[in-house]
Image (cartoon, grey):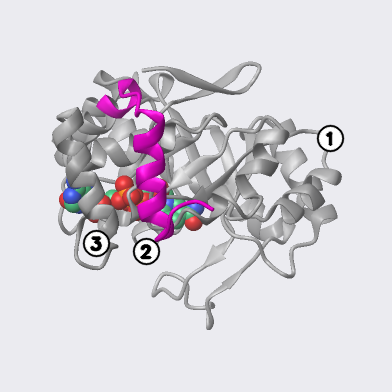
Amino acid sequence: MKQCQLAPDFSLSQIVYGVWRWDEKNQTEKDISAIIESCLSLGIDSFDHADIYNDYGNEAFFGRVLKTNPGLRKQIKIVTKCGIQLLSQKKPLTKVKHYDYSREHITYSVENSLRHLNTDFLDVLLLHRPSPLLNPDEVAETLSDLVLTGKVRYIGVSNFTPQQFQLLQSRLDIPLITNQIELNLNHPFPLTDGSIDFLFKEKIKPMIWSPLGGGSIFNETGNALIRNKLQVLEDKYQVGADVLSLAWLLKHPAQLIPVIGTNQVERIQAAVKSTSLALELQDWFSLYEASLGNEVP
Ligand SMILES: NC(=O)c1ccc[n+]([C@@H]2O[C@H](COP(=O)([O-])OP(=O)(O)OC[C@H]3O[C@@H](n4cnc5c(N)ncnc54)[C@H](OP(=O)(O)O)[C@@H]3O)[C@@H](O)[C@H]2O)c1
């Protein structure tokens, strides 16, 4: 699988695997080792985490697998996030869900992520969601210090508007290398609200979360027009609807990096097929039309 260059000496695999849906109640370390192995054998070497996933549990879950496979850390890239404070029995002082981008919290969160993941550096640290109270001067100084000490190699953001991105970047001497945002056939708005255009202009490759709408594209909660159109194209291209939906994203010239979340190895294999499927122009627009609910003007 192709690598996507995010900085001169740093790349992520064209498809990233996201661990949000892992849950120790349903999966064992053996299960997740099998997922990681499958990803690696398919060329997916980049894994997307957040401190909060699985009630603050998934970094440690992943870290236990890293500990039992000493060679693994060198083969993979770890993206993780900080900033959201969830209500959790593990966080008795948190009384209301909120965002915290103070120097203390970012530093504390990174130290925790490193400890849980059994690693001494994070490849990428993302600020999970923008906060109205985020102080760009304080955050820029904190992130720069984390990079300077080698605890974090690269920094980025998630769910930021172009203006929020620019504000933080204006206070930094080092680049924000990505903005991880939601984009899928059920949620095409970033294609027209300026989010993707801004990143494209700045030559920043977007990471795309829920590229399959969290599975909603394929079930009754989703849009029937999209499902019908996918069905027609399944026959034409002889691939599944998930492959087509990812290929639809990958056709965008801004080089989007989908972060997939399936727990099924066969679906990871299917996702990889999308990287070599070139959707014809009019098929791309037929899906776009279904996504918008009307033909383009
Ligand atoms: N930055 C943020 O704010 C943010 C927010 C949300 C997520 N994320 C990141 O993005 C990653 C991916 O998000 P996501 O899990 O929502 O991605 P996704 O790939 O859009 O959705 C995965 C879900 O879709 C289902 N699915 C996949 N293929 C299917 C098919 N052919 N038919 C029916 N269902 C299918 C999967 O079920 P199976 O497991 O059964 O295949 C799984 O429940 C997360 O792990 C996380 O790392 C980031």
Instruction: Locate residue 98, reporting x and y percent.
Output: 58, 73
The boundaries of the magenta stretch are 273-297
Tell me the amino acid under the disc marked 3. Ala
Q: Residue at x 41, y 41 (%)?
A: 285
Are the residues at dot 3 and dot 1 in contact (C-beta closer than 8 Å)? no
Tell me the amino acid under the disc marked 1. Asp
Label 2 CB-ligand 1 distance < 8 A: no
Q: Quadrant of residue 172?
A: top right
> Which secondary structure, mark 2?
helix
Figure quadrant of the N terminus: top left
Are the residues at dot 3 and dot 2 in contact (C-beta closer than 8 Å)? no
Are the residues at dot 2 and dot 1 in contact (C-beta closer than 8 Å)? no
Instruction: Locate residue 206, reporting x and y percent.
Output: 56, 39
Q: Give the alpha-carbon distance from disc 3 to disc 2, as whole Å.
A: 33 Å
> Which secondary structure, mark 1?
loop
Q: Is residue 178 above or below residue 227?
A: above
The residue singled out by tag 2 in the image is 55
> Is residue 29 something that shows in the picture?
no
Q: Residue at x 80, y 61 (%)?
A: 135
State the count of labels.
3
Q: Residues within 10 Å of mark 2 (few under 14, many from 20)?
A: some
Outermost front residue: 297
Q: Earlier in the sequence, mark 3 or mark 2?
A: 2
Tell me if 23 is positioned left or right of 188 in this view: left
Residue 173, label in figure: 1
Q: State whether the magenta stretch is mostly helix, strand or loop.
A: helix
Q: Residue at x 31, y 24 (%)?
A: 277
Tell me the amino acid under the disc marked 2. Asp
Instruction: Locate residue 157, reporting x and y percent.
Output: 62, 48
The residue singled out by tag 3 in the image is 224
